[in-house]
Image (cartoon, rainbow, N blue to C red):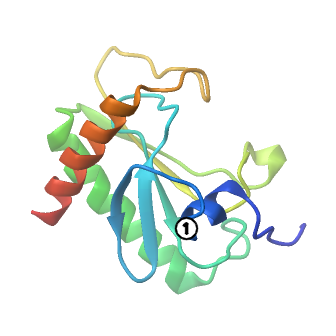
């Protein structure tokens, strides 16, 4: 497996070099909205540690990501009046991974509404900002 590349786009977001629509952060995890969401509220949950994917992440960091993903899923069900949640996580190119920093997709779903194709349409900034604020507020309780 190739080494972790600290110049990947998510590493740059974690360092504050690129902007994002943050919804959650703690000492181990950072979560933000996907700018090309497959459904409204599509959130990416990452460990702050330099982990390429599930094959090299420290178990405690993976557990922190899973816990945050669960909390975000619960909040997203309410905020987006979702009927369900799709959780996706890809590893290496053959497994569908595109950005090589471990991340979990939390995608609120409505019954009978198909997800948009991956990376197909960039959402408007004002929509992303609104969704991020609502989801972050719901996570704070």
Q: In the picture, which quadrant includes the C terminus? A: bottom left
- Location of residue 50 (image quadrant): bottom right
Viewer can see residue 102: no
Q: Quadrant of the N terminus?
A: bottom right
**In the image, what residue occupies the spot 42% across and 53% down?**
32
| 10 Å crowding of disc 1: few (<14), some (14-19), many (20+) | some
Give the tally of numbered discs: 1
Q: Secondary structure at mark 1?
A: helix
In the image: residue 132, left or right of residue 38: left
Q: Is residue 119 visible?
A: yes
Q: Which residue is at a point 62% across and 59% down the rendered structure image?
A: 10
Q: Nearer the viewer, residue 34 or 117?
A: 34
Where residue 133 appears, as percent x and y from the top left, is: 23, 48
**Front residue (pair 6, 88):** 6
Residue 54: x and y in percent read 66, 67
Residue 119, compared with residue 77, is above or below; it is above
**Among the 4 quarters of the image, the one containing residue 67:** bottom left
Which residue ends up furthest to the right in the rendered image?
2
Residue 23 x/y as whole percent: 32, 56
Outermost residue toward the left? 141
x and y percentages locating residue 20 in the rendered image: 47, 51
> Would residue 139 be found to the left or right of residue 101 on screen?
left
| Residue at the farthest front position | 17
Residue drawn at the location 73% of the way across and 45% of the way down: 98
Which residue is tagged 1? Answer: 14
Residue at the location (62% across, 83% down)?
A: 58
* Quarter of the view holding residue 134: top left
């Amino acid at each position: 497996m190739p080494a972790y590349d600290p110049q990947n786009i998510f590493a740059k977001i974690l360092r504050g070099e690129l902007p994002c629509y943050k919804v959650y952060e703690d000492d181990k995890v950072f979560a933000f909205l996907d700018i090309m969401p497959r459904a409204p509220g599509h959130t990416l949950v990452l460990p702050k540690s330099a982990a390429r994917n599930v094959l090299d992440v420290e178990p405690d960091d993976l557990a922190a990501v899973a816990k945050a993903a669960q909390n975000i899923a619960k909040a997203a069900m309410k905020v987006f009046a979702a009927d369900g949640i799709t959780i996706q996580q890809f590893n290496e190119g053959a497994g569908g991974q595109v950005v090589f920093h471990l991340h979990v997709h939390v995608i609120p779903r409505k019954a009978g509404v198909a997800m948009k194709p991956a990376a197909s349409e960039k959402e408007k900034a004002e929509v992303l900002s609104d969704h991020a604020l609502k989801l972050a507020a719901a996570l704070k309780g």
